[in-house]
Amino acid sequence: MSEKTRYTDVELEEFRGIILDKLEAARRDYDLLKATLMNTDGNDVTDTSPTFKVLEEGAATLSKEEAGRLAQRQMKFIQSLQAALVRIENKTYGICRETGKLIPAERLRVVPHATLSIEAKQNQGK
């Protein structure tokens, strides 16, 4: 029997479901981070006493920087998931971009936006 070169349409639909679930959760998280950055909850230091305001502004700046980094990372994750959906449409999903071999389904269930097999990923570090 020859080695499998691509996933079946049924398998691709399973992966699509996994990706859509992760995409929905990622967008929710991104929206929360964005709300934190924009301070839409109105929890600001403008109504506190001047003594504590200086300390709180430093913590708020640090918190916003961290939220900004997390939001950027979350957006990159969302884009990776969207790219995976495109690969499903093109029927190229699950094919390692380095080796050309099929990425194991177990890996794709855990990391559905993966474009490298474990073998290729390990070779990258060398």
Image (tube, rainbow, N blue to C red):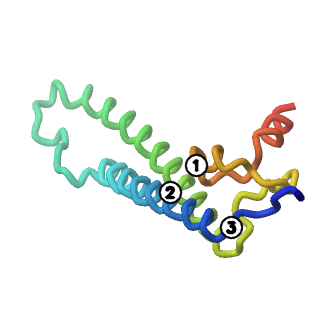
Q: Quadrant of residue 85?
A: bottom right
Tag 1 near tag 2, CB within 8 Å: yes
Instruction: Classify mark 1: helix, strand or loop.
Output: helix
Side (left or right) of 125 relative to 38: right
Image spot of residue 48 (x, y percent): 11, 34
Circle number at residue 92: none
- Between disc 1 and disc 2, whose residue precedes? 2
**Distance (Cα) linking label 1 and label 3:** 15 Å
Circle number at residue 18: 2
Q: Quadrant of residue 28?
A: bottom left
Instruction: Classify mark 3: helix, strand or loop.
Output: loop
Q: How many C-alpha atoms fall within 10 Å of the one at disc 2: few (<14), some, or many (≥20)? A: some
Side (left or right) of 54 relative to 6: left
Image spot of residue 65 (x, y percent): 43, 40
Instruction: Classify mark 2: helix, strand or loop.
Output: helix
- Of 43 and 101, nearer the camera is 101
Q: Residue at x 64, y 69 (%)?
A: 88
Residue assigned mark 3:
8
- Of 75 and 81, nearer the camera is 81
- Of 120 and 110, nearer the camera is 110
- Between disc 1 and disc 3, whose residue precedes? 3
Q: Quadrant of the N terminus?
A: bottom right
**Distance (Cα) linking label 1 and label 2:** 7 Å
Query: Is residue 23 depicted above or below 53 in this figure?
Result: below
Q: Nearer the viewer, mark 1 or mark 3?
A: 3
Image spot of residue 67 (x, y percent): 40, 42
Instruction: Give the residue type at disc 1.
Output: Arg
Side (left or right) of 54 relative to 46: right
Q: Quadrant of the C terminus?
A: top right
Residue assigned mark 1:
109
